[in-house]
Image (spheres, grey):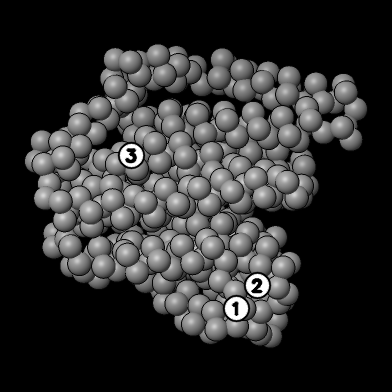
Amino acid sequence: MHLRLTSFILYLFSFLLIVFTISYIISLGSDVFGFDTGSIPNGTTTLLEFLGILYIFIKLKTIQKIPYLLAWVIVWFFWMCFNSLLTTDLPLYIHLRETLFWPILFMFSFCLCTSKEMNISRLKYCFILIMLVSTVLFFKISTARTAMIISNLEGYIASVNYIYFPLLTLPWIFLVKKEAIRNFLLFVIFLATIISAKRSAILICILTAIVYIWFNYIKNKKLHAIIRIAIPIIFIVCIYFFISNVMNSRSEYVFSRFSSISEDKGSGRDIVWRNVLDTYSKSPVLEKIIGHGHNSAIIVNRGHNIDLSAHNDFLEVLFDYGIIGLILYLLLHIYLIKRLFFLKRNKSELFLPYLASYITMFIMSMVSHLILYPTYFTFLATFWGAVEGQLYKKRFGVSG
């Protein structure tokens, strides 16, 4: 495929994904901006899916051998098509648009990165822009809302879920070649995450920071011993300074959020999990096997006056998509871990970004709903697809 056409597709995809991100975050913070983006998020989702399917049909026939992860995504795609028929709370096309968004973008990025003119490094600039824009919007909404209701600081800070938009660009930021720029962007994400006071987000940042410093500096024999020791110390001091002197009252709240886990049971997650498990245990055998349908767990919790999903992807997948869906979901985790070891064994520069992506997925899968709502999860899916495309190209050569 010609360079101009491939570049046009890349730019169009980047434009639509950036518009989707901006419009979605603004819709969440419409009280701050004074307007809503209406149907723009759904419209851009549909356009991205249409672009993805069109490109996949053009490119997929040139693929010599289907990689395992791509085969898994195709199977998941069709299982979601079937599963969406099981729920009638919303029109079928809405369930399909939600469940198929990330598989389509995975397949799209895979096909894109098998092209001669494309590689994962070109694609990363789209997500750097997304990280910058979403971080600015996060600070805008967070600052404005805190000023609005400073008397209820605790309740408002902890509700800023849009921190996950910049946070889930972490694997892409790890791909930045220039160390100073990469460290600056990672530092900005880390600080924004602390301000958000989201425990799962902070845990993701802490673990990714540890593995980043460990592999990039402490274990890096090319660096002088003084530098290998100094970098982690500087990082810790900067974070401590920011928390102690900049965040003021917020820092106390951040620490209290972690110390209160045993009391609030993860913001009531224990009740949510129990409701879903109780309903699943009483379900007919067929529903246990094939599931209750996409996003059904929230319907169960609404019956208990709790408007929440299962807040655990393993439980959510079991309830919504059945034992078959859970087996598929576990296979995804197994394959991602195997790919991680493959990259480590081959000393690939993709290892650290991939490790960051899996840390993010695993933590959010345990305490949140990553695979259920295909917004920021598409950032990880696109990354995995691009990695598979890059590795395919090394093994089989350029497709199409």
Q: Are marks 1 and 2 in contact (CB under 8 Å)?
A: yes
Q: Name the residue under label 2.
A: 114
Residue displayed at 20% across by 37% down: 277
Question: Mark 3 or mark 1, which has the lower sequence index?
Answer: 1
For residue 31, side relative to residue 378 (left or right): left
Question: Mark 2 or mark 3, which has the lower sequence index?
Answer: 2
Q: How far apart are marks 1 and 2 (CA)?
A: 9 Å
Callout 3 environment at 10 Å: few (<14), some (14 to 19), or many (20+)?
many
Q: Identify residue type, mark 1.
A: Ile
Q: Identify residue type, mark 2.
A: Thr
Above or below, 187 relative to 95: above
Instruction: Give the SS element for disc 3.
Output: loop
337 or 90: nearer the viewer: 337
Q: Name the residue under label 1.
A: 63
Query: Tag on residue 312?
Result: 3
Which percent across, then down, holds residue 341? 65, 45
Q: How far apart are marks 2 and 3 (CA)?
A: 34 Å
Residue displayed at 28% across by 47% down: 318
Position of the N terminus, as image quadrant, is bottom right
Residue displayed at 10% across by 36% down: 304
Callout 2 environment at 10 Å: few (<14), some (14 to 19), or many (20+)?
many
Above or below, 355 relative to 42: above
**Quadrant of the rendered structure where residue 44 is?**
bottom left
Closer mark to the observer between disc 1 and disc 2: 1
Q: Distance between the residues labelled 3 and 1?
A: 35 Å
Residue displayed at 59% across by 42% down: 356
